Image (cartoon, grey):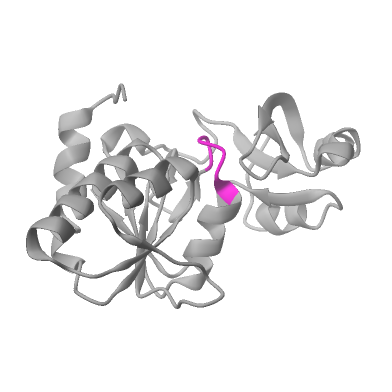
Amino acid sequence: MDIENKEAKEKIAEKILNKVKDGQTIGFGSGTTSYIAAEKIGEKVQKEGLRITAIPTSNEIKEICEKYKIKIGNLIENEIDWAFDGADEVDLKNMWLIKGRGAAMFKEKLNIIASPITYILVDETKFVNYLGEKCKVPIEVFPSALKYVSNELEKLGAKDITYRGFTENNNGILDVKFEKIYKDLEKDIKAITGVIESGLFLEYKNIEIVR
């Protein structure tokens, strides 16, 4: 995998290794920094003979867990002890995030809301003055609702909507630039019939930035 700022991301990923304990269930996020963290956790598990359960948010991360013979669990039978993930943009002032550029926003959000604490692993390139400064907001949409959802998003201030393709759940992805991201926008997007999930993470109290 071609990873930008790989050295910086490796240093960040290493900061959570001491949190890995035998018997834990850990939520594994997606993205390049999470990919590196998953590899490092896998190496630690093999070296120290630890037994952990992973709740992966993408097929790519699931494959890493299988590579290191980490047990794969689910949120029906397991409770997460802690989770880690990356982010595409971070507004430190408000502790708001945009995630899901890797098309896993639904499973990522499930892990975060199910975990008492999620460590967000980000290098300096992810910090912005305001959310939406560099990235569009990814929105997962039931395929037949794409047109309707697009029209409703315009009512919420969307000024640029691009169709990207499909998630691993076979839902469509709309990448959306909003005129302004306000604190209730995540809830307003989710209230649109046909929206499965968005990549907005606003007003979450159980996240900690690791940089």
For the image, the number of numbered tags is 0
Q: Residue at x 48, y 49 (%)?
A: 97
Q: Where 19 falls versus 70 (above or below)?
A: below
- Residue 18 appears in the rendering: yes
In this orientation, does residue 121 appear?
no
- Residue found 71% across the figure and 24% down from its top: 162
**Residue 100 place in picture, x, y as percent:** 53, 42
Dominant SS in magenta: loop
Q: Residue 51: image x %, image y %?
A: 23, 70
Query: In percent of the image, x 8 and y 57: which residue is there?
Result: 47
* Span colored in magenta: 100-105
- Nearer to me, 46 or 136: 46
Rendering coords of residue 143 (x, y %) = 82, 38
Report which quarter residue 52 is drawn in.
bottom left
Identified at 13% across, 66% down, the residue is: 49
Residue at far left of view: 47
Residue 84 location, quadrant = bottom left
Quarter where residue 142 is shown? top right
Tell me residue 14's x, y (percent): 15, 50
Residue 105 drawn above or below residue 49: above
Residue 97 lies in the magenta stretch:
no
**Residue 116 placement, left or right of 140:** left
Left or right of residue 152: residue 169: left
Q: Is residue 132 left or right of residue 7?
A: right
Question: Residue 52 vs residue 91: left or right?
Answer: left
Say which quadrant the N terminus sits in: top left
Is residue 16 shown above or below 24?
Answer: above
